[in-house]
Image (spheres, rainbow, N blue to C red):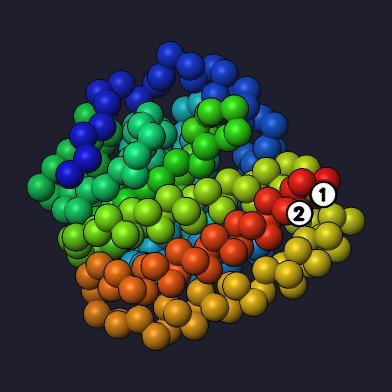
Amino acid sequence: MTALPSSLIPATDAARLRALERYQLLDARSEKILDDVVAATARLFRVANTTLTIVEETTVLIKAPYNLPVVVERVLREQSLCSATILQEDTAVFEDLNQGSAPGVDLSLILQLGLRFYAGHNLRTADGHNIGTLCLLDGLPRHFAPAERHLLAQLAGLMMHLLELRRVLGPHSGLTAVFWQVIYRTMSEQLAGLAALSERADTAPGPLAEAVAIEASALVAGLDQLVTATLRQK
């Protein structure tokens, strides 16, 4: 069980919010490449729900939800484990929310939705600000193995690089949609590999087999290299 800080508002929050403004993320419009990576993450870890969240000043935006039990665009910052996750560097894990608590976070909404497991990793900008998380949620308690923590951190890093590329190119609409289509075609083979890997994995709940996690890690590293190479060209 990960211990989280008691205060949800870091001393550097004003600077963090200024960094967040650069990414122009504060709407919940669907963007295919973000949605597809989130969906692939959910299938790979075999969890019911996965979200890309953005921690705003007083609320948390559910930017790219996968299979949430209700349609929620924003929740109060004090109702989200993600608002506490951004205060630490490591992956935050609650294997059974019935058996623990996060200081400063009201878990009532999460528990009302029937969710018992949470794991989240920061979206960290190049200048060191945690603007949100990539997180996993499930209705059943589960062990989260070290190899899974490493893989989730890699996927969060990939997502942050995609957000950085989005900052450079603009959102996935209008003229920039053409550029995103080219990027998506380039990424499609690795995304297909992740999808195939998730289909081959045991469908029973519980931690990923270490061999599966290692293979997935290599695929995610390939995706990340593609995105960072594209960023260097811009």
Q: Residue at x 58, y 72 (%)?
A: 191
Mark 2 Cα shell of 10 Å, populated few (<14), some (14-19), many (≥20)? few
Q: Locate the N terminus by quadrant.
A: top left
Q: Amino acid at mark 1?
A: Gln
Instruction: Name the spot of residue 158 as percent of width and height, x first.
Output: 56, 53
Q: Secondary structure at mark 1?
A: helix
**Residue 204 picture location, percent across and down:** 24, 80
Place residue 182 in its image quadrant.
bottom right
**Residue at 47% of width from left, 53% of height from top?**
154
- Residue under label 2: 230
Asked if residue 29 is positioned above or below residue 139 in the image, the reply reads: above
Left or right of 69? Residue 102 is left
Query: Are discs 1 and 2 less than 8 Å apart at CB?
Result: yes
Q: Residue furthest bottom?
A: 200
Residue at mark 1 = 233
Hey, which quadrant is residue 211 in on the image? Answer: bottom left
Residue closer to the observer: 81 or 1: 1
Query: Residue 45: x and y, percent?
Result: 36, 67
State how far apart marks 1 and 2 are (Cα): 5 Å
| Residue 206, numbered circle | none
Q: What amino acid type should be assigned to the residue bearing mark 2? A: Thr
